Amino acid sequence: MADRQSPPEVDRVAASRRAVAARRERASLKRDVSTRVISPQELLRRALAEPASAAGAMRVTEFLTSIPAIGEGKRDRILADLGISPVKRLAGLGARQRVALQEFLDRRWPEIAPRASRSRLVVLAGPTAVGKGTVAAHIKQRHPEIHLSVSATTRQPRPGEIDGVHYFFVDDAQFDRLIDSGALLEHATVHNRHRYGTPREPIDRALSEGKTVLLEIDLQGARQVRAAEPAATLVFLLPPSWDELVQRLVGRGTEGEEERARRLRTARVELSAQGEFDYRVVNDEVDRAADEVVSLAR
């Protein structure tokens, strides 16, 4: 009887590297769900669409515990209620189990549908460092027919920012006068430090001329606009992943360590509000994300 040959060393090394990469990808996906970069429904859709992917290979136990507020005890009760074995992987769920899991997710974390009646007022919001300003600047450069609102702020200009172009830089007394006179469509204090607001008059003028108006603002401001102008279209800009968001914030180099930590805490809260928006756009490539926002605005 011939000796059984062991696989070449290079094959074992390659297999080990693939296994490590797959574990890292699954871990990244779980972070994205736990930080609400993607919804549980989105991860399930990816798993069912690509069974051989990291999402498809994820065990249902890992999937459920990656969802905020679901610990091991609650996870086990959910699996028992849904009739799903804890050893199942997402891609290996049967047809009935897929439906049961989908219905459970939709009951607990409903994904809203865009409203039919929408105005030409488009709000672009998202977490810190997601690239809202970069996407908005790209739209301004490529689509001059879209009016990009310029916000007022009490913070100091960053290198390269021009007053009246990137922001209207004002002091606290000037900002108070804008509020008192009703000149702002929305205003908010961001990161517990600086105030931002959207001047109302340029927006009203552009809308009266039949133009599409794009507001690049924070979450608090977006909620105020929704309350004041219910027909406005709200678009939430997402990072490709939580890890990418952290890298963008660190790489920007405009904040100290304490400020970065504060902004990341805020980003987690902001990401949880994406369900309030009509559309979600992933900023994986600026050109593509900007084109998608423009198509939604139209």
Image (cartoon, rainbow, N blue to C red):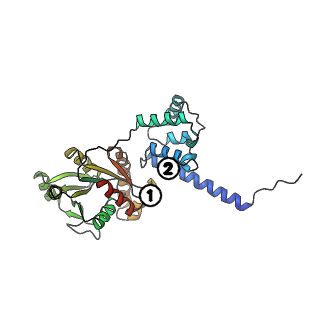
160 w.r.t. 118: above or below: below
Image quadrant assignment for residue 114: top left
Task: Of the two numbered discs 2 and 1 on the same chain, state the one appearing first in sequence.
Answer: 2
Residue at the far bottom: name it: 160
Q: Is 197 left, or right, of 250 in this rendering?
A: left
Query: Viewer-proximal residue, 113 or 163?
Result: 113
146 w.r.t. 67: above or below: below
Q: Where's the C terminus, which quadrant?
A: bottom left
Q: Is 69 left, or right, of 218 in this rendering?
A: right
Q: Where is residue 258 in the image (x, y as percent from the top left)?
A: 37, 57
Query: Viewer-proximal residue, 220 or 89?
Result: 89
Say the numbered circle drawn on residue 38: none
Residue 129 makes an appearance in the image: no
Residue at x-position 38% and y-position 38%: 110
Which amino acid lies under the numbered mark 2 shown in the image of this protein? Answer: Leu
Helix, strand or loop at mark 1: helix
Residue at x-position 59% and y-position 38%: 88
Helix, strand or loop at mark 2: helix
Q: Is 140 left, or right, of 92 in this rendering?
A: left
Residue 26 makes an appearance in the image: yes
Residue at x-position 20% and y-position 56%: 198
Instruction: Give the distance between the C-alpha atoms of the residues marked 2 and 1, in whole angstroms.
Output: 12 Å
Which amino acid lies under the numbered mark 1 shown in the image of this protein? Answer: Glu
What is the crowding at mark 1: few (fewer than 14 residues within 10 Å), some, or many (at least 20)? Answer: some
Residue designated by label 2 = 29
Residue designated by label 1 = 244
Q: Where is residue 104 in the image (x, y as percent from the top left)?
A: 45, 34
Q: Is 235 left, or right, of 96 in this rendering?
A: left
Residue at the far right: name it: 1
